[in-house]
Image (spheres, rainbow, N blue to C red):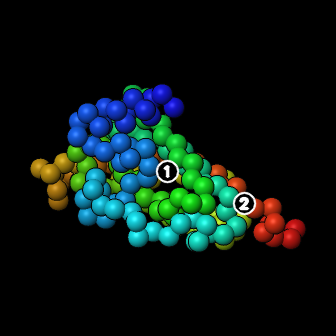
Amino acid sequence: MGIRVFEALKKVLSGSKAEEVLSPAPLEGDARSAPASSAPRIRDRYPEVLKIAVNLSSRAPFEKMEPTIRGFSMGPDALADFRFRCKNTECIDGGFKLSDEIDEMVQAYETNKHGRRVCQGWDGKGNIGHQRCYYEMNFVINISYSTKTAPDT
């Protein structure tokens, strides 16, 4: 938890807003400033869900450094917006969307899923049309459901 607070402080001091660091980020348009308020609440989209926890591990391509790890825990009042910004500060139009995975999990009443994504944004303004970002993100999604809505087994 201390590392997340440090990262937030570092971003705030560099001109970013703290909430951009501590919550999922929208990807439409400029990912650093687009509002996510158009998304429904988790309770409205998935009434049977009590909590969604998403753990992300990001790594720059071809680097041997330890990955950056982030975690998000979202309750029924949180926005059902599962788009996350790329950790490459130079990335243009990149990021990761996990909405389809969460939709599939809820439909199948799954509690755990993991996978990997590669960012397809551009690696800086000078590389648009020439060099993709290729930052990697591994994810783990855990969903807790209300016991009263569990399907019959």
Mark 2 or 1, closer to the camera: 2
Q: Residue furthest left?
A: 126
What type is the residue that disc 2 sits on? Answer: Tyr
Residue at 61% x, 60% y: name it: 76
What type is the residue that disc 1 sits on? Answer: Arg
Q: Give the answer, above or below, for where 1 lies relative to 140.
A: above
Q: Which mark is residue 116?
A: 1
Q: How far from the left and from the top, in percent, is residue 72?
A: 53, 46
User: Which image quarter holds the C terminus?
Assistant: bottom right
Q: How far from the left and from the top, in percent, is residue 60?
A: 35, 39
Tell whether 101 sits left or right of 110: left
Q: How far from the left and from the top, in percent, is residue 41?
A: 53, 66
Tell whether 150 sits left or right of 143: right
Residue at 27% x, 56% y: name it: 33
Q: How far from the left and from the top, in percent, is residue 4?
A: 44, 34
Residue at 59% x, 71% y: name it: 44
Determine whether label 2 and label 1 are within 8 Å by CB. Answer: no
| Residue 130 in which image quadrant | bottom left
Number of labelled discs?
Answer: 2
Secondary structure beneath label 2: strand
Q: Earlier in the sequence, mark 2 or mark 1?
A: 1
Q: Give the answer, above or below, for where 126 lies relative to 145.
A: above
Q: Residue furthest front?
A: 77
Secondary structure beneath label 1: strand
Q: Which mark is residue 145?
A: 2
Residue at 60% x, 55% y: name it: 75
Q: Give the answer, above or below, for where 109 lies relative to 121.
A: below
The residue lying toward the viewer, choosing from 134 and 21, is 21
The residue lying toward the viewer, choosing from 120 and 23, is 23
The residue lying toward the viewer, choosing from 14 and 85, is 14
Distance from disc 2 to disc 1, alpha carbons, whole Å, reads 24 Å
